[in-house]
Amino acid sequence: MSPQPSRPGAARGTEVTVAVCQIAPRVGDTAGNRQRIRGAVEAAVERGAHVVVLPELAGTGYVFTDAEELRAAAQPPDGDTVREWEALAARHDLVIVGGFAERGGDGRIHNAAALADPTGLRATYRKAHLWNGEKTWGFSPGDTPPPVVDTVYGRIGFMVCYDLEFPEWVRLAALDGADLLCAPVNWPLSPRPDGERPGEIVRAQANASVNRMFLAVADRTGVERGQDWLGGSVIVDADGYPVTPLRLGQEAVLTATLDLAEARNKAISERNDVHADRRPALYARHSRERA
């Protein structure tokens, strides 16, 4: 749908300003984490943002010692963390996507994300592909596809961190019509050859390019319980090129204005279309043989 902005400086046509907030949450500092999030959102609003993306587990921090500590930090989707995002979205006419530790109605804990807009909470998602310690801290994997939400600013899909490493999963959001895929992440700092761009960012670029879809990745920064973080937040255009500078390891709010209509054109040459050229019957057969 065409955006219908209600505040000065809001999007015109299909142009949308997107912000990724690179902050440093800390386990056990709930009040401080909320303050960091509020400050980052306010900074994004000052820069004209319409869509704001926060890191994975932004409300709690990431490196838990055990299941008991994780369970104590987790909240339901109608808990204080997401309710505050709903209030910020309503106050500033925003879409906010952020990561939180969800305590489900069945008692299970999920590494989750929520999308809120001025009307309230629109969708939640549970990370399907758990990374390393998440498998021992007590997280349960989700089993539903990434949501794609029709917002006033465009069709927005979202997933969490390691989910981006599975092209089949990213393709689901693209095929469901996402103009923009938002990804709250916590990317650990890993060794790489001198002069090379971090592999996580390369893969984000590839995901955007092969789907002709914008990506907005909000990473965290800082050192938490001995774990150093990449701080690789990036916004990537539908051709797969970064449109924000890298601020590796620094706290930052990065913004870019995107014409989301470009993501609805899947043509890459006169006779090629990244969706229409797919041959799913071939891929299904191959998948069965390899299962």
Image: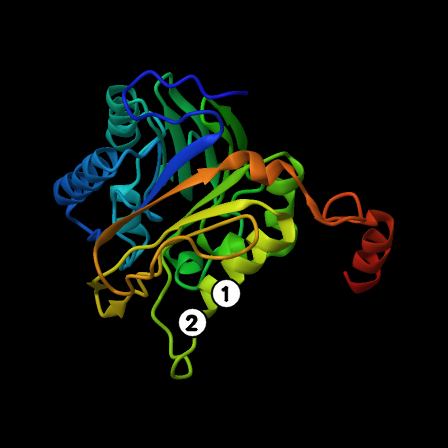
Q: Earlier in the sequence, mark 1 or mark 2?
A: 2
Image coords of residue 102 (percent x, y): 37, 38
Query: Is residue 98 at least partly visible in the picture?
Result: no
Of all residues, the one furthest to the front in this rendering is: 270
Q: Quadrant of the C terminus?
A: bottom right
- Are dots 1 and 2 in contact, CB under 8 Å? yes
Image coords of residue 123 (percent x, y): 46, 28
Residue displayed at 19% across by 35% down: 42
Q: Nearer the viewer, residue 97 or 206?
A: 206
Image coords of residue 111 (percent x, y): 41, 46
Q: Is residue 14 left or right of residue 262?
A: left
Q: Say the numbered circle drawn on residue 134.
A: none
On screen, residue 224 above or below 208: below
Query: Is residue 122 at least partly visible in the picture?
Result: yes
Q: Nearer the viewer, residue 12 or 183?
A: 12
Image coords of residue 60 (percent x, y): 25, 46
How many other residues sit within 10 Å of disc 1, few (<14), some (14-19) or many (≥20)? some
Of all residues, the one furthest to the bottom in this rendering is: 194
State the separation of the CA atoms marked 1 and 2: 7 Å
The kind of residue on which mark 2 rests is Arg
The residue indicated by pointer 2 is 197
The residue indicated by pointer 1 is 202
Query: Element at badge 2?
Result: loop
How many other residues sit within 10 Å of disc 2, few (<14), some (14-19) or many (≥20)? few
Q: Is residue 289 left or right of residue 263?
A: right
Scheme of image coloration: rainbow
Residue displayed at 63% across by 49% down: 211
Q: Is residue 99 left or right of residue 92?
A: right
The kind of residue on which mark 1 rests is Val
Give the quarter of the image for residue 107: top left
Residue displayed at 37% across by 24% down: 117
On screen, residue 217 above or below 148: below
